[in-house]
Each structure stands twice: as structure tokens, then as C-alpha cells.
Amino acid sequence: MELSPEAMSAHRLQGIDQQREKDRFFVRFRLPLGRWTAEQLAGLADVVAKTEQGKLEVLSRQSVQMQGLTRAETEAMREKLTALGLSPVNSSSKSMHNVVALYETGHFVQEVAALATFLDQAISPDVALVILEHKFAIPMSDAVPDAMPGAVLYHDIGLLPVARPEGLRWQVYVGGGLGRQPQRAELLPVEVPTAQVRSIVQAILDLFLAVGAGKRMKALVHSLGVADFWAQVQERWTPIDELLPAVEPLPEGDVVITDLPDAVLTAVQLRALAMAARRFTGGVVYLGTERQIYWRGILPEEKDHLLAELAAVGLGQRGIIAWAACPGRASCRRGLIDTALRGAIEAELQQKPHLLAAFDRLRIHISGCPSSCTRTQVADIGLNGAVMKGKPGQPAVTITVGGGLDGAYPVLGTRWGVVEREAVPAAIVTILEEWLAQREGEETFRQTHLRLSATS
Ligand code: SF4
């Protein structure tokens, strides 16, 4: 049954949306601060086991979704998720669940955890309710600016810690975004002590509500220009010193990062994660920015045991290709192609062992349309569903290469070309052959691309 726009809008505020099949829905919810407890994982395993598809998908912005649900199931599921502390986009609580803590490998892990926790609880719920509809995200990275600013450059507001002689300060980036029209964030001419961060974030959100609601932040910053934007923030900003509550220290020890094949978890895998979280980390794991799981506080002698437990359920292997694919046309109404391309691409590459032997790691992200929900612009190879000129009914794919947020050069991929969907595996072989022909020494795919981009 087709729902009215008003009913659909109310559902969306609760993280429920309609799929391409009108009688099927998906539920999307966030993991506050990317944190997953063993109890939540075990509870989710029970929920997932009762769904027809028997799996959940891990999305970007530390969120998760389940598809193929009837309307009655979505209602029941919302209650179960709320009981687990995983309520969908939340219209009633006093927390803002789109503050994203990006735990990379930098020096300020504890500071990021503390500030993210504080902001998640302290941003005004009135503000949060309005902006949540716009996929607003405030990521904080523990990376040092010279090494990895990329993670905060393509979000609405990004906060990056920097060590100064007078103490820790936060740089504030605004107006970044990916999607159909990627835009790099602008750096505001200010560095803010931790105690004043909430007040400046609130001033930015107040400005957004006053003059930008209905747009994306990137559109507002672009239309005003960063100087005018900053002037208007200053008019609204009264720096307020606030004491951050203490947070539990993150466990000391090694960090082990494991991939999620296809960014999907079954009930069996969720149960295994819950058990491993209890046994190896004190009961908490973290979701990374590339849909990996971060295991913190692992004793060196236990690492192999952890990986063995995960391998038993098809997890934990760090594959040489990191895949991410959105649901695509199979269930998303905007999808232009079926995104199930992994099998065909792997089969093609198996025929070319010299290519597989040439790289340690390659990120291939697939999105069913130009909206780029899997952040195809920042993958080594990005594939987006497209409409081919002169052949509107023919499933086609736009291919971009060389994107990435890692290292000192976070850049968006450049367009390689448009091919018919069935020709994608062969096109990837061609791209990798081109790379090998131009590669110098032991360069990675991305390093070669960056070198060539810098000299062209
Ligand atoms: S990229 Fe397009 S097809 Fe894929 S989930 Fe996003 S909107 Fe849907």
C-alpha cells in the first residue's frame, strides 16, 4: 500500500523508509559514537534471526539497516531496537545520534571519545530534530592534521584536534559533503579549546537553522562564502566554558582492525562478535569509517585467537579487496543498477593472478546511483549506477579511480569512464593493467594515481 507523503515523512523521522517494493520497508538506526556493546550485538542477532533476509547491513556514518520488512515488522523492530539502546533516528530522546567519532590511529583517541560523548548528549534536541532529516553529521577525528585530515573534510561539521603550546585546540571545518556534488569543507579561522566546542557547534547549528534549513550545510557555506558564514557564526557565538564529564578510558593494548565482507552481518556472525567482544575487549567494539570493526585493548598473544574465532564465521580476514556496496536497484527506489557485482569482478580477477599479486589492498565501492551512499568518490575504484547517453534503458556504470581520505592527500577520485554494467569486470582489469604499466617501484594504486595527478 502506498503511504501518504505525510505518513512517510513521519516514518522517516523514526528511521523507517519504503523500498522499491511498496509493501517492504527498511529500518535504519545509528550506533551512537560507533560503539557496539556485546549485549547490543547479541540482541541484534536475535532480531536479525527473525527477519526474512537474516542479515543487517553496515552503512557509512556508523549506522546500520535491515531491509525487506513488512510495516508491522518495522513497528515491532523499532521497540526491540529502542530496548537495546539503538533506537532509529530519534524523535523523542535528548540525544543527537549523528555525532560520529572517527577513531583512526592518531594521538587524541581519549579526547575525541570524551568530546563526542559530550556533544552527543549536549546538543540541543530541538536543533537535532530539525537537522537529522538532512543526514547531518559531525565527525571528530583523532588523527593529526598533517597526516589525515580527510575524514573530517567531507562532512557538515568536522572537528580536528591540534596540540598547541597553550593546550589542546579544535579546528572547525564546515560545509563538506560527498553525494552527487562533492564539496570539500572550509576551515574556519578559529581554534577552539575543548571547553568551548559545544558553544561554537551550537552557534553553527543555530545559523544553519536560521538561514539554511531545507538545504545541506555544504550548499549554505557555498552560497554565503566562508567569510560571511564565519561572520554570521560569530554574531551567534558566545564562547562558554563547559566541563566535559569524564569518560571511561579506552582500553590499552593493540588495536586489531577486521573487515566486514560486503559490509553485511548475519545473526550467526553477530553472535560470534558478541562472544568475541566479551572475551577479548571487555565487551565493546567500535565501527570504523570504512565499515571495519576496531578491536581495542587486544593482548598481543590473544590476537591470533581472536582472528581464529572470527574466521570460523567468515569474519576477520583482511581481504586484499575491501568491498562496499549499497542495496542498489534490488531494493532502493533510486537505484539505477543491480549492485551485486562483486562475484563477477572477483571471477574476472581470478583469471589474472599477476594483478591480484600486485596489490596488498584495493578499495572498490559500488553505489546504485550517483547519490554515492557508499562514498565511491573516496575509493580506489568507485562504481556508480548511471544512465548511458543514447541508451537510457541500458544499465551503466560511471567509474572513478584514485580517491581516498588516507595519507596527506585526501582527494576525490577522477572519472575514468562510463561502461555498460556487464562490462565492469573487464574495465577493472583494464584499469589495473593501466596502473601496472605506469607504476613506479612498489607504489600502491593510489600512490601512482596521486603522482600522475600531481604532474598532469
Ligand atoms: S547510492 Fe543510490 S541506489 Fe544506492 S542506496 Fe544510495 S540512493 Fe539508493
Image (cartoon, rainbow, N blue to C red):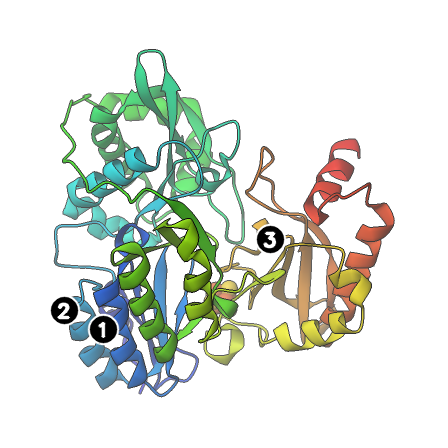
The answer to whether mark 2 and mark 1 are in CB contact below 8 A is yes
Closer-to-camera residue (8/286):
286
Identity of the residue furthest to the top in this view? 165
Tag 2 residue: 83
Residue 161 in the image: state x and y as whole percent: 37, 28
Tag 3 residue: 379
Residue 199 in the image: state x and y as whole percent: 21, 29
Identity of the residue furthest to the right in this view? 437
- 3 or 2: tag closer to the N-terminus: 2
Question: In whole angstroms, how far apart are the C-alphas of marks 2 and 1?
Answer: 9 Å
Tag 1 residue: 43
- 2 or 1: tag closer to the N-terminus: 1
Taking the spot 44% from the left edge, 71% from the top edge, the residue there is: 264
Task: Give left or right: position of 407 versus 139.
Answer: right
Q: Amino acid at mark 1?
A: Gly
- 1 or 3: tag closer to the N-terminus: 1
Residue 400 in the image: state x and y as whole percent: 67, 54
The kind of secondary structure element at disc 1 is: helix
Quadrant that contains the N terminus: bottom left
Taking the spot 50% from the left edge, 53% from the top edge, the residue there is: 179
Q: Amino acid at mark 3?
A: Ala
Taking the spot 29% from the left edge, 76% from the top edge, the residue there is: 45
Quarter-of-image position of residue 29? bottom left
Question: In whole angstroms, how far apart are the C-alphas of marks 1 and 3?
Answer: 32 Å
Q: Please say whether residue 421 is visible from this viewpoint.
A: no
Q: Amino acid at mark 2?
A: Ala
